[in-house]
Image: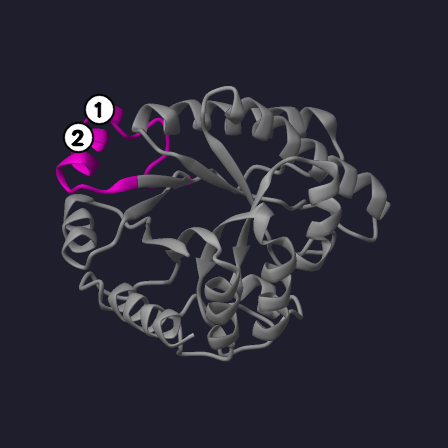
Amino acid sequence: MDVRQGFMMEHGGDYRPAFDAAAEAGFDYVELNMEARFSRETVDAATLRETAANHDLDLIVHLPYTVDIGSPHEPAREGACRELEASIDAAVEFGAEKGVLHARSLARPFHWEESTVVDAVHESVRRPDEYAEERGFSVCAENLKGDFVDATDFPALFAATDAAMCLDTGHAYVSGMDGTEQAAFLREYGDRIAHVHLNDTRMDENDEHLPVGLGRVDFDAIAAAIVETGWRGTCTHEMLRFDDTFEYVRTGKRRFEALLADA
């Protein structure tokens, strides 16, 4: 087992305190949200790279997600893929090793045939994945709760693309896949899962992005699957923060490490 942990950074303002907190808490990396705070137009790559190096932290990015990669309209997909490719180039300049993209469509299910939209999602995952590979970068397609593609549909995405997966525990749970089922999924498809978003929820319909152990997701089962299969990858604590003390991410890390140790 070789599990590296980080947390999502997306708050505004000076990002250096977050790097300080990550280093002090023993995280291995931080995941930068390129949708807003760390968009390619707003960040100086050299300064960001230097900050990470000074804190002995690696970088992962979350690629922009308000682009519609699964649009049934080809020009919209083209624009989305071009933005992802430009963001991948920026992430490589940051020194990041991998990036997460949302495998979804904003199309309405009562307007479009499912196969049309799913094929569009697969094609738009395949294109940035191939683009990234040529640049020594890895793309991880993330599961969401969606009308066309959720965690249960990823075996088809695996068959259609070579992309790795980012398994989001909260999104999977609200899509009907509980912790035990997620553990079974990881055991079966662990070789295609390169990244995990760790977050908990107390709700069946909507994910809340809470720290590990504060909701209904069975992380004991997930941790056991990680340990017993010797899974290797990165795990980001992706949660909403209500202040700047970073206690939520510290709590999530402590609880997850305890589960791994006891598995």
Q: Residue at 38% across / 62% down in the picture? A: 239
Q: Quadrant of residue 1?
A: bottom left
Q: Please state if 247 lies on the left or on the right of 125 as rendered.
A: left
Q: Please state if 148 lies on the left or on the right of 173 as rendered.
A: right
In the figure, 9 relative to 212: above or below? Answer: above
User: Start and end of the magenta stretch?
Assistant: 35-58
Q: Quadrant of residue 80?
A: top right
In the figure, 251 relative to 34: above or below? Answer: below
Q: Residues within 10 Å of mark 2 (few under 14, many from 20)?
A: few
Task: Determine the residue located farthest toward the top in the rendered image.
Answer: 134
Residue highlighted by disc 1 = 46
Quadrant where the C terminus sits is: bottom left
Q: Residues within 10 Å of mark 1 (few under 14, many from 20)?
A: few
Measured as percent of width and height from the top left, residue 159 is found at: 74, 41
Measured as percent of width and height from the top left, residue 69 is found at: 63, 36
Q: CA distance from mark 1 to mark 2?
A: 6 Å
In the figure, 237 relative to 67: above or below? Answer: below
Dot 1 lies on which element?
A: helix
In the figure, 94 relative to 240: above or below? Answer: above
Q: Residue at 46% across / 57% down in the picture? A: 197
Say which amino acid is labelled 1. Ala
Q: Residue at 70% across / 39% down in the picture? A: 121
Measured as percent of width and height from the top left, residue 257 is found at: 32, 68
Asked if the magenta segment contains residue 43, the reply would be yes
Numbered tag placed on residue 50 in the rendering = 2
Q: Residue at 52% across / 58% down in the picture? A: 168
Say which amino acid is labelled 2. Glu
Asked if the magenta segment contains residue 16, the reply would be no
- Asked if labels 2 and 1 touch by Cβ distance under 8 angstroms, the answer is yes
